[in-house]
Image: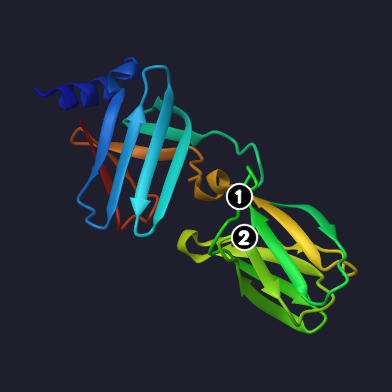
C-alpha cells in the first residue's frame, strides 16, 4: 500500500489528521497550475495560477469523514478604500489608485458616476485615471476583469475633483474558502469549487 493510500485509510478511520499533511499538486487541468500545502500544525497555504490571474489563500484545515476541510483566514483589510480627496482649480476629475506603499496601480478600470452619467477610465503607470470632461463626481468603483473583481461604490464629495484610493492586491487575489470540502478519492484531494462538473484533483508529492 502506498503512503497516499495509507493516509487515505487513516483519514477514513478518523485517526490523526497530521498523517494527511504534505504538499499536493493539481493534476489534469492544462490551463492551470496549483499547489496546496497542508501543514502538520493545522495550517494550509494555497496558490493557483489560472490564465492571467494568480490567487492565494492561507488558513486552517482539518480532516473530517473522508474529506479535508479548508477555512481561509479572515481578511484584515478592505481591497479598496478612499484615502483622501481635494478640490483643484482646474477642470475634470482625476483619480489615483495606489498600492499600500504609495506605488501606482496600473491597468485598473475606474468607473465614476457623475453629473453627466457614468464614465469609465483606466489607470496609467502612475496609477492615474483622468476624466478631463467629467464634473460632479458622486461615486467611484474599480473593476479588475481578470479577477472578476468589482468593488462596492464609494461615495465621493461632488465639490472635489481629485481623489486618492488605496488598493490592496492581496485582498483582491485572495481566494476565500468557507469550510471548503475536498473529498479524499483514491488518495487524492478533489476540490469542486469551480463546479461539480469541473473537479480539481490534487495529488500528494
Mark 2 residue element: loop
The total of numbered circles placed on residues is 2
Q: Which residue is mark 1?
A: 103
- Outermost left residue: 1
| Residue plotted at (57% across, 63% down) | 108
Disc 1 residue crowd, few under 14, some 14–19, many 20+, Cα 10 Å: few
| Picture coordinates of residue 57, whole percent (x, y) | 46, 39
Q: Are marks 2 and 1 in contact (CB under 8 Å)?
A: yes
Residue at 74% x, 68% y: name it. 94
Residue at image location 82% in from the left, 63% down from the top: 156
Q: Quadrant of residue 61?
A: top left
State the quadrant of the C terminus: top left
Q: Is residue 149 above or below residue 28?
A: below
Residue 163 in the image: above or below residue 49: below
Question: x and y percent of residue 136 in the render?
Answer: 85, 75
Residue farthest to the front? 90
Q: Eyeballing the image, is 148 above or below 134?
A: above
The label on residue 127 is 2
Tell me: 192 left or right of 78: left
Q: Which one is earlier in the sequence, the residue at label 2 or at label 1?
A: 1
- Residue 37: x and y in percent read 34, 30
Q: Quadrant of the N terminus?
A: top left
Q: Residue at x 50, y 49 (%)?
A: 173
Task: Say which of 183 and 171 sits in front.
Answer: 171
Amino acid at each position: 500500500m502506498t503512503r497516499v493510500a495509507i493516509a487515505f485509510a487513516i483519514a477514513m478511520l478518523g485517526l490523526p489528521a497530521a498523517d494527511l499533511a504534505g504538499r499536493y499538486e493539481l493534476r489534469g487541468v492544462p490551463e492551470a497550475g496549483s499547489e496546496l500545502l497542508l501543514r502538520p500544525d493545522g495550517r494550509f497555504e494555497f496558490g493557483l495560477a489560472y490564465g492571467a490571474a494568480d490567487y492565494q489563500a492561507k488558513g486552517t484545515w482539518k480532516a473530517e469523514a473522508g474529506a479535508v476541510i479548508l477555512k481561509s483566514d479572515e481578511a484584515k483589510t478592505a481591497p479598496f478604500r478612499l484615502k483622501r480627496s481635494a478640490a483643484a482649480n482646474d477642470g475634470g476629475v482625476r483619480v489615483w489608485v495606489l498600492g499600500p506603499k504609495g506605488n501606482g496601480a496600473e491597468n485598473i478600470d475606474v468607473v465614476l458616476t457623475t453629473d453627466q452619467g457614468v464614465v469609465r477610465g483606466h489607470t496609467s503607470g502612475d496609477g492615474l485615471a483622468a476624466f478631463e470632461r467629467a464634473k460632479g463626481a458622486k461615486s467611484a468603483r474599480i473593476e479588475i476583469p481578470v479577477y472578476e473583481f468589482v468593488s462596492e461604490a464609494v461615495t465621493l464629495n461632488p465639490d472635489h475633483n481629485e481623489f486618492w484610493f488605496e488598493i490592496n492586491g492581496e485582498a483582491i487575489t485572495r481566494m476565500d474558502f468557507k469550510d471548503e470540502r475536498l473529498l479524499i478519492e483514491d488518495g487524492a484531494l478533489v476540490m469542486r469549487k469551480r463546479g461539480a462538473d469541473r473537479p480539481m484533483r490534487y495529488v500528494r508529492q
